Amino acid sequence: MAETFLTYNALGSFLVRLMQIGTLHGPTLNDLGVLSFNPVTSPDLLQLNYQRTLLPPKKYLLPPQSPILHYAPTEGYTPAKTPGDEILLFGLHPCDLAGIAYLDRVFLDDRPDPLYASRRERLVLVGISCESDEYCFCGDVGVCPTAAAVPFDLFLSRQDSGFRIRTGSRRGEEIISWAADIVGTAGAETRPAEAAETARRICHAVGKRRMFEGSTLWDDFAGRCLSCGACSLCCPTCYCVDVREYGAIDGQTGERVQEWDNCLFKAHGEIAGGINFRKTRQERFHYRFLHKYYGFGPLRDVISCVGCGRCRAVCPVGIDLLELFGEEPA
Amino acid sequence: MIETPVPAVILAMKPLAPDILFFSLQLDTGTVSSNFSFVPGQFLQISAAGAGEAPFSPVNLPGDDGVIELCIRKAGHVTAKLHTLQTGDYVHVRGPFGNGFPVKQMEGQDLFLLAGGLGIVPLHSLLSYLVMHRQRFGAITFMYGAKEPSALFLRQELQDMACTGNIKFMVTVEFAPEDETGKTSCNIGLLPDLLQGAIITAERSYAAVCGPPALYKCLVGELKTLGFKEERILLSLERRMKCGLGRCAHCAVGQDLCCIDGPVFPYSALKGIEGAL
Ligand SMILES: Cc1cc2nc3c(=O)[nH]c(=O)nc-3n(C[C@H](O)[C@H](O)[C@H](O)COP(=O)(O)OP(=O)(O)OC[C@H]3O[C@@H](n4cnc5c(N)ncnc54)[C@H](O)[C@@H]3O)c2cc1C
Ligand code: SF4
Ligand code: SF4
Ligand code: FES
């Protein structure tokens, strides 16, 4: 489908139209003033000039806590109910779309997970271009040969007088056709994409399999880290989960629940009897570094950092794994 | 492979040691039991309702009757619950998962099976397989080490298999009460000591090792000194398997996942990986 154009003046009507089509979610400020993806009750609550939400949209696909099996004495274990209606997720930055692309590769292609697939199926992704700040660096990670194409149903690129809209799926085309009275045809107006130096450095260092073994930064990080786990919680591609089972109060039934886990927690490398394969924080940082920049499992050798900058922005003690790449010659 | 846990009734339970119970389970569903199979070294996820699930290797080979035999040590949350169950109660089973021992690759070779403590479980199953297909393999030596004679369980079964299968069977304990030393044919010492007396043609041998992590570090060194190539030293690793399906990333060993790429790894694949052993 040809690209269309949405003027800034028509944005409000476009959002109202989306709300008529389905349930709209997007970046809004919650009661505590934290920016997060939430259901949108009124278009003017949307914060579209935002830098980043605290949690990435992975919470729609891998909720922090999610029942996977239900147990009852008569039925045994049965799969958890799959979620309901379509959600129009509006205002996703390219890095977050890349994060979803990464999760899709794991849970749709390599390790198919029916629960993930059902959650993914109900999401309509509406991307929006962004202005980078000092924390993020997504620009060029996409040029690494292993990076996946970014999925979207609609993508809005900011121009001087409005958004150029690209469609990336049939559903996206349908939505645009329902809003044909609001959008116009796209003119020649385009802004050049930004390129980020940090991303280039990462690709370069990873290409040479640099692990920075001798760096003094590891000790520095390990000395400061509080093992709070914020850096993994807010990462759009971190998907480690723990699985626990909770008996119900009736003493008969129970629920098996999948919960976000964290490789910076000491217990992550533990087995029964208290043996731990990653006792020290240094070891846990090495492990995180290996998995973020070299990948693991089905996506071995795929960089899993999409450059959103969240981990650098949230760390309470200012730890930034990317400082390691500063040791890579430009 | 069974993805959603299916019920299995406990046919029998018996204590093998103060903290270890032998379980005989019967899979419930006719369809499942007729298609259910595994190779030695693979593992099953066993659920205790309300407590959760944990990985265990079957101690024997799969029969066509849907019977599964396990030896389970009480080690924490799930295993404590399993230990409270009784004959006639149900557990639930998923699997099998993981790669298992590369039995085809091991054909025609001399084999050294080295078990420390509860590591005996998957090696008992491997030995059953080797005895069943005895003519396909060269000389077989089974070495079994434990803390003390009472911790050497399944000993009679192993001895019987060794007899029928023409297998050299050696045991060692770290210590034995004074009066027992003479009576048992037990060596006093560590597993690596047993290796020193053995006649080994390393280039046509495989070593399969299962035991506590501390054992691997010293055994690998010993085996390499004896001339074993790194890809001929097979180690079965333990991790907290949360899914068995490569999804939870809880079992990663370097860039590998223990539940998919393992739990049996040649040492060559583990060498240099921080936190592998
Ligand atoms: C391939 C393989 C084969 C094995 N074979 C055998 C074998 O044949 N025999 C044997 O005895 N052992 C075997 N083991 C070891 C066995 O898996 C462990 O001893 C077992 O996992 C211990 O489980 P546990 O829950 O009792 O221990 P714990 O150390 O208590 O494990 C606790 C786990 O439960 C979780 N947990 C805590 N609270 C809850 C809750 N409310 N609900 C659910 N989970 C919770 C924790 O997150 C933790 O992961 C094997 C291990 C592997 C990897
Ligand atoms: S590692 Fe940090 S910058 Fe990279 S995707 Fe994860 S949170 Fe974003
Ligand atoms: S956010 Fe910072 S302090 Fe918290 S675990 Fe990550 S590196 Fe450590
Ligand atoms: S046990 Fe979940 S990935 Fe291996």
Image: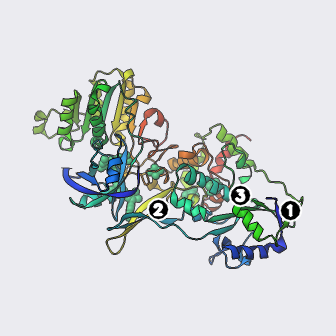
Q: Is residue B53 above or below residue B232?
A: below
Ligand 2, by image quadrant, is bottom right
Return the residue at label 3: A94
Residue A258's disc number? 2
Q: Amino acid at mark 3?
A: Pro
Give the vertical position of B118 relative to A248 (above or below).
above
Q: Earlier in the sequence, mark 1 or mark 2?
A: 1
Give amino acid for label 2. Answer: Gln
* Vertical side of B197 occupied by A203: above or below: below
User: Image check: A323 left or right of A132?
Assistant: left
Between B150 and A316, the one nearer to me in the picture? B150
> Where's residue A63, x and y in %?
54, 65
Q: Chain of mark 3?
A: A
Q: The residue tagged with tag 2: helix, strand or loop?
A: strand
Who comes first in sequence, dot 2 or dot 3? 3
Chain of the residue on which disc 2 is drawn = A
Task: Please name the residue shown 88% across and 60% down the image.
Answer: A189
Residue position marked by numbered label 1 in the rendering: A186
Task: For mark 1, name the chain.
Answer: A
Q: Amino acid at mark 1?
A: Ala
Q: Closest to the observer: A212 or B258?
A: B258
Same chain, labels 2 and 3: yes
Q: In the image, residue A105 lies at what x, y percent?
A: 59, 51
